[in-house]
Image (cartoon, rainbow, N blue to C red):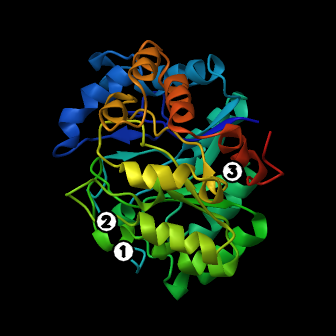
Amino acid sequence: MRIDGHVHVVGNGTGGTGCWYRPRGVTRYGAPLLLRTVGLPRAALTGDLDRLYAARMREFVRDSSLEAAVILAQDNAYRPDGVRIEGAGSFYVPNEFVLDLAARHREFLPAVSIHPARPDARDELERCLLGGAVMLKCLPNCQLIDWNDRGYTGFLERMAESGLVLLAHTGSERTLPVLDARLADPRVLTRALEIGVTCIAAHCGTGLMALDPDYFDVFVEMTRRFPRLYGDNSALASCNFRTRPSALRRMVAPDLQCRIVHGSDVPVPVTASLLWAMGIVSWRQWRETAAIANPIERDVRIKRAMGFGEETFTRLAGLLRRRAAR
């Protein structure tokens, strides 16, 4: 099964979904661009965004060469003592929303988001496991999650026991407010890996050139020590200067590509323009992919042009919980 393992869903709470979207700072200026990526008008921000956005994602997956997409919930940020940090995020997507979408539509697989410091974290984990969750998504630097905190041991042990995959943002983050930049380091996953959780370091620890620390070399070194560590290639087909040509050449080399899974990061804009400027793809490949209206399929074609092989798109299916995998 070919899967996009990194697709965001957003909503404004219409229909009682519990979602909210409150972009702050520079994020406010990017909101119209994100909507344009998925072909929605700006009026959707105050309209029936939840239904329109989910329907568009389903359409993109159905009309692509993929069979499913992992859709991501987004929890709030909490302090280690379990107190919620008010106003820390730009959007919120409850677990029930992605679980319900996945239960109704075969194109979706649910990735829940549970901050392990939440007072109800263990109960919510059990509920989501029963609901068919295949993955747990987090942004440690934005949600203030240090997975090396021994207070999270029981939570991680249950994840390992259940086979729930942990997808954690690593490297640069310029879309959401960052609470602790140090938690962008892939080493934040060390204890989870030692306990036996299969982890995916989103973006492979890459950083925006000249702006943020780059942890790609750290990620590569960790793959040698931890057989359960993988990375995804999400957000590499965009104009965010996350990809260095040398890092990409290393990423598509056979010994590392076998640890990479496919992800788009839609609705982050998908384009090969910067990749062409860097000499990574040809002019013809850039123009051919630019003509593809579907951003999920455009990302697939760009990743293939970058050198990612077929197993990159099918590898995730073998890592997900068998009970919930389709």
Kindly identify the residue that appears in the image at 72 percent across and 47 percent down: 315
Give the residue pinned by disc 1: 79
Near-viewer residue (190 or 49):
190
State the CA–CA distance, disc 3 to disc 1. 25 Å
Task: Give x and y (percent) for residue 125.
Answer: 64, 63
Kindly identify the residue that appears in the image at 63 percent across and 70 percent down: 122
- The correct choice, above or below, for 44 with respect to 267 in the image is above
Q: Are marks 1 and 2 in contact (CB under 8 Å)?
A: yes
Q: Quadrant of residue 226?
A: bottom right
Give the residue pinned by disc 2: 85
Q: Which amino acid does label 2 sit on?
A: Ile
Q: How crowded is mark 2: few (under 14 residues within 10 Å), some or many (20 or more)?
A: few
Left or right position of 252 against 66: left
Q: In which quarter of the image is the C terminus?
A: top right
State the CA–CA distance, disc 3 to disc 2. 25 Å
Task: Give x and y (percent) for residue 177.
Answer: 26, 55
Task: Give x and y (percent) for residue 210.
Answer: 20, 57
- The correct choice, above or below, for 78 with respect to 247 in the image is below
Q: Residues within 10 Å of mark 1 (few under 14, many from 20)?
A: some
Q: In which quarter of the image is residue 191?
A: bottom right
Give the residue pinned by disc 3: 133
Near-viewer residue (29 or 83):
29
